[in-house]
Amino acid sequence: MLENPEVDTRVKADVLARIAGGADEVVVNFLRLVAEKGRAGELEEIVAELDALVAAEQRILDVELTTATELSDVEFGRILGRIESASGRKVQASRKVDTDLIGGIVLQAGSMRLDASVRGRLERLRHDLTHARS
C-alpha cells in the first residue's frame, strides 16, 4: 500500500483509465473521477445501480423466486409468465431453494415480498391465533 493517499488515488485513476483502453472518453473520465474521489472500491455497487436504472428504463422487473424444492425449467417459465402477465413487465428472475419453506413460493421484487409459502401461511395463522386470544 502506498504511503501517500493522493498518489495512491492518482495511480488508481491511471490504472482504471488504462484498463478502459479504447473506451469512450466519457467512460475513461468517469473511471478517473471514481478513483480520484476514492470510490474505486464501490465500482460493483455503481454497476448494480446502473443495471437497476437500465432495467427500470426498459420496464424489466427483477425478481428472486424462492421455492422449497428445485423447479423444472417448465415450472419456472410458467411462473415467470404469470408474473409478467400480472405486472405487465418483462421479468428477469433468479431462483433460490429454501428447504425450510415446506412448500409454496416466496417472490421478492425490490422491497415488495409476496410470501405464498406453507411456512409463511403457518406463521400468519399462528400470529392470528395468538392475537385473537387477547
Image (tube, grey):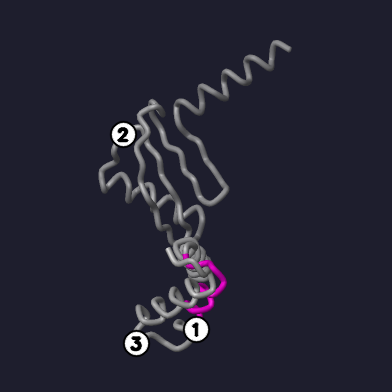
Q: Which label's residue is closer to the chain start, 1 or 3?
A: 3
Q: Which mark is residue 69?
A: 2
Image height check: is 69 above or below 37?
above
Q: Distance between the residues labelled 3 and 2?
A: 46 Å
- Residues in magenta, as a range: 29-40
Q: What element carries label 2?
A: loop
Q: What element carries label 3?
A: loop
Q: Return the residue nearer the eye: 1 or 14.
A: 1
Q: Residue at x 50, y 73 (%)?
A: 9
Q: Where is residue 74 in the image (x, y as percent from the top left)?
A: 27, 47
Which residue is labeled 3 in the image? 22
Q: Where is residue 12 in the image (x, y as percent from the top left)?
A: 44, 73
Q: Which amino acid does label 3 sit on?
A: Gly
Q: Position of residue 2 (x, y in %)?
A: 45, 67
Q: Is mark 1 on a helix, strand or loop?
A: helix
Image height check: is 23 above or below 59?
below
Q: Return the residue nearer the eye: 121 or 24.
A: 24
Relative placement, left or right, of 24 versus 52 is left
